[in-house]
Amino acid sequence: MPAIVEVRGAVKDYPLGKLKVRALEDVSLSIEKGEFTVIAGPSGSGKTTLLNLIGCVDVPTAGEVIVDGQATSRLSDRQLTKLRLHSIGFIFQSFNLVNVLDVYQNVELPLLLQGKLGAAERHQRVKALIERVGIGEHLHHRPNELSGGQRQRVAIARALVTRPALVLADEPTANLDSVTGASILDLMRELNEAEQTTFLFSTHDHAVMQRARRIVRMLDGKLAES
Amino acid sequence: MRILALIAFRNLVQARTRTTLLGTAIALVMAMLVLLLSLAGGIEDNLVFSATMLSSGHVTVAGFHKSKPTDAAPLVTEAAALRKVLEANTPGLDYLVERQRGWAKVISPQGTVQSGLSGIDPVAEWRLRDSLHLAAESDYVDGGSDEVRGTLETLGQPGGLMLFANQAKKLHARVGDTITIQTETQGGQTNTIDLQVTAVARDVGLLSTFATFMSDQDVRTLYQLNEDTTGAFWLYLKDIDRSEETMNHLRTVLEKEGYVVMDHVPAPFFFKFDTVSGEDWVGQRIDLTTWEDEVSFLTWILTAFDTLTWMMSVILLAIIAVGIMNALYNAVRERTRELGTLRAIGMTRRQVLALVLLEALLLGLMATGVGAVIGSGVALTLDAMAIDPGLDALRIILLADQLHLVVRPLAVGSAIVLLTLLTGVAALWPAFRAARLKPVTAMQHAE
C-alpha cells in the first residue's frame, strides 16, 4: 500500500521565553493508506506535536512531513488550509464543535467550505453519515444538548464527511467514559474497514491501544517503537 | 457565505448581554442621528416653504434698470413682453406670478418697523392665500383672545395690508387699524400711503419678520411705476429640483431674445445694489436666480446645524467604535478555540475575517435598524405635537414658530449604511487578529 504520511527526520522546537524547547527530535514515520494506527505515549512525549505536524496545522523546524504526496514545509498557509480541507479530517479530545450550529450544520460545514457538492447531494451525504454514526434522531440538536459520546460521534461525522484520505484523532476517548469510549472506537474501526479511511490516533489509554492494528510509541519527543 | 452569516448571527444571539449592550448604544446613537437629521430636514423644509412664499419663486427673473450709471432700481421694464417669453420658454412651468417689491417704513401710532413690501395680484396669488394662516389675536396682542380676526380673502386688494404676527406685535396693531407705509423713490422722493390692516398672519420663520403684503397697485402708486413695469417674475415649476437647470435654460433663451442678462451671482437682489450702482451702464439688465440664491444668506443655519449634527454623531460614534472594538476583541479571545478549530477543518483566513466582520455588520445593521425606527417614531411624534420652541432665537434657527421635523427615507437609509459600515470598520482590528490565529491553537486547547 502507498504511504499517505511520510515523516522524515522531523524536528520541532518551541520557544519558551529565551529558551528553546525541543518537542520532537528526529522522528521518522510512514503511515500507509487504510491503516488504523495509534501513537501512544505519556503526556509530554510529543504525540500531539507529531499529530499537529501530520495534520498540517504546524510545520516542522527541520526535517520533512509529506501528507498525501505534498511536503508541508513548502506549502503556503493557503495551500495548507486547502490540504486540510480536502485530505484530512480532525477529531479532537474536547470535540471542538461549533456550539451555535446544530448537529446537521456542524457536519455540513466542511462540505460548505469545500463548495464542491450541490445542495441535494450534500444533504444526502450529511444525513447518511449522521445516521451511520448513530445520532440520526439528534439532527437539529445543538452540541450542548448532547452527551459527550454523542458529541464525539458528531465530530467523527464532521471529520469523515469530506471523505478525507486521513483522519487524525487526538485522544478521542479521553473525555468519555470507558463504555462510550469503546463504542466510539468500534465505530471508527468499522468506518476504517468499510471505507478504507486511514485513522491515526494519539492516546495513552491501554484500552484504545488494544484496538489498534499498529502502535507507534513515543517517549521524550522521540520514536520509541514503530 | 450562508453558513458564515448563520454562525455570526447565532454568535450574536448566544452573547446576548454583550449584543444587547452594544446594540443599545449603537441604536441610541442612530436614533439621535435620525432625530437631528429630521430636525435639519424640517428646517430645510421651512426654508423652502418660507423662501418660495416670501422671497422668490423656484426661479426668479428680475433685474435692474438704470436711467443713469449711479442708479440701481430693482425693476423690470417692458414686463408684458418678457412675461410672454417666459411663459413660452419655461419647461415644466407650473405657474408664474409678478411681485412688486419695495422697502418701507411701516408706521403705526405706537411703533415703527422696517419691512420689505410685496405687492401682489389678488387673482393670480390665490395659492399664497391658501398657504398663509391667520394668527390668533393672542399671538400679537397682550391679553388678546384665541380667536382669529380679519380675512385673507381680501389679500392684495387695494387699500388693504397684511402683517405677520411679529410685526403686528411690535406695531401694537390689530385688524382694522390704519397703518402708514412710507417709501423713498429712486429719485429720492418720499411717498406715503395709508392702508388698513385686513389680516394678521401666523409667522413663517425669520423671513416673515421682513415681509408685508399689500396690493400691487398700491406699490405701483407708492413708487410711481407704470403698468408695464414690474418688480420680478416668480416662476414656480412642477419640480423644484429643476430650478437651477431651468434658470440656466432661461438665461440662454433670454440672451437669444436680445435681453442683456447679468452674470449669475448666487445672492438675493438686495445684496446687489452696491455692485450694480457702481457699474457703468444704463438701461435694463435681467437677473436670474434660484430660490436658493435668494435665501443664500440663511443657508448658514442649515450648514451650522448639519455640522453640529455630524460632529456630535462622530464623537459618539468614536466612543461606540472603541466599545465595539473592545467587545469584539474579547469575543475573539473567548472563541480562540472555536476559530482555531474552524481554521483546522479548512476555513481560510479570509473566511475567518469575514466571519468576525459579518458579526459586527449584522449587529450594526440590526441596531441601526432599531435606532432608525425609534428615531423616526420620536421625530414624527414631535412633529405631530407642533411644539412652540418658546424662544425667539430658536424660532430664528428653526425658521418657524413651531417645531417641524421631516423624516427623509434617503437620509435615514444613508445613516443606516454609514453607521453599519463604521461598525464594520471598528471590527477590522479584532477581525484581523482572528484571521491571524494559527490553527494549532485549537489542538493545543484540546490537550
Image (spheres, rainbow, N blue to C red):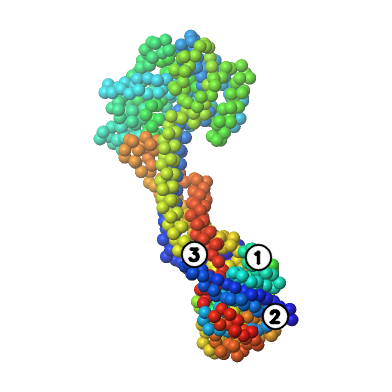
Tell me where residue A147 appears, x and y as whole percent: 51, 82
Q: Secondary structure at mark 2?
A: strand
Left or right side of B425 for A58: right
Q: Which residue is mark 2?
A: A32
Mark on residue A75?
Answer: 1
Mark 1 touching mark 3, by CB under 8 A?
no
Q: Is residue B266 visible?
A: yes
Left or right side of A192 for B28: left
Tell me where residue B10 appears, x and y as whole percent: 51, 67
Choose mark 1 or mark 3, whichever is in front.
Answer: 1
Return the chain for callout 3.
B
**Mark 3 is on which residue type?**
Val
Return the chain for callout 1.
A
Circle 1 crowding by C-alpha within 10 Å: few under 14, some 14–19, many from 20: some
**Mark 1 is on which residue type?**
Leu
Mark on residue B332?
Answer: 3
Residue in front for this viewpoint, B146 or B409: B409
In the displayed structure, B383 sits above or below A165; it is above
Circle 3 crowding by C-alpha within 10 Å: few under 14, some 14–19, many from 20: many
Return the chain for callout 2.
A
Tell me the CA gap for discs 1 and 3. 27 Å
**Sooner in the amino-acid sequence: mark 1 or mark 2:** 2
Mark 1 and mark 3, same subunit?
no
Q: Which quadrant: the N terminus of chain B? A: bottom right
Tell me the CA gap for discs 1 and 2. 22 Å
Tell me the CA gap for discs 3 and 2. 38 Å
